[in-house]
Image (tube, helix red, strand yellow):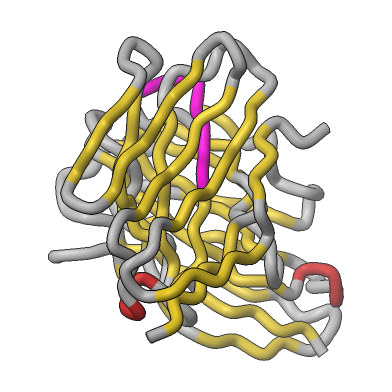
Amino acid sequence: GAGVSQSPRYKVAKRGQDVALRCDPISGHVSLFWYQQALGQGPEFLTYFQNEAQLDKSGLPSDRFFAERPEGSVSTLKIQRTQQEDSAVYLCASSSGRHGYTFGSGTRLTVV
Amino acid sequence: QQQVKQSPQSLIVQKGGISIINCAYENTAFDYFPWYQQFPGKGPALLIAIRPDVSEKKEGRFTISFNKSAKQFSLHIMDSQPGDSATYFCAASINTNAGKSTFGDGTTLTVKP
């Protein structure tokens, strides 16, 4: 596709519910990143894939967060047993490796 | 420990004026410094970027000035327009090949007509 596509755009989850957020990167982009953006703050790194390999997951805040990219294209960020502090915008970005990122519009997660 | 500090938090400029946003970093291993522009409800969009082997880069109305010894870099927006009103983020990464980036907290720019 022409850009990075994320779905859903908005998600409301009850505390304790599991959620799955999807990212379709730009076709051919090897690198894929997930970031978390709290209101009024800059994006915070969560995890990084190069093709299907998860090379860095140092930013995942707890073991309730899990990301995968099984075929090296589409990626899913899963959050188990959601908590209120998980409420944020989750941004996916892809890169060809030569320039900066192309971000998607994000998924706004609200945990109630 | 915040590795990239951005200022000011908000900025109001008259149309036609110059907008200046500053960032300071701590990690000397950073070697790629992009600026992103974000509109409400959208993801950040890459505006301009610089590597530490040059002191300035200009693209249209946007200029990055880079001071390696001071570990500082800034974004200058010349002839600011109301359409430039957005949140701007500086960032820094260690690997120019799309390594993970550390972002500043953002500057909300308002350009008054």
> Residue B85, image x and y in percent?
43, 74
Dividing the image into 4 quarters, which one contains the N terminus of chain A?
A: bottom left
Image: A112 above or below A44:
below
Is B38 part of what is drawn in magenta? no
Left or right position of B19 against B15: right
Q: Residue at left 51%, top 13%?
A: B68
Residue that appears at 44% across and 66% down? B38
Is residue A72 toward the left or the right of residue A43 in the image?
Answer: left
| Place of residue B64 in the rendered image (x, y in percent of width and height, measured from the top left) | 36, 36
Where on the picture, by quarter, is residue A103? bottom left
Q: Nearest the camera: B42 or B35?
A: B35
The one nearer the camera, A65 or B78, is: B78
Q: Is residue A63 above or below residue A37?
A: above
Relative image position of residue B45 (x, y in whole percent): 34, 59
* Residue A81 lies in quadrant: bottom right
For the record, the magenta segment spans B90-97
**Number of marks:** 0
Q: Does the magenta stretch include residue B96?
A: yes
Asked whether residue A8 is in view, the answer is: no
Residue A16, quarter of picture: bottom right
Query: With A21 as the anchor, is A100 left or right in this view?
Result: left
Q: Is residue A79 visible?
A: yes
Which of the pair B5/B95 is nearer the observer?
B5
Q: Please state the horizontal and vertical placement of residue A55, each as a whole percent of the image.
A: 51, 28
Give the residue displayed 74% in from the left and 66% down from the top: A80
At 37% across and 31% down in the image, what residue appears?
Answer: B98
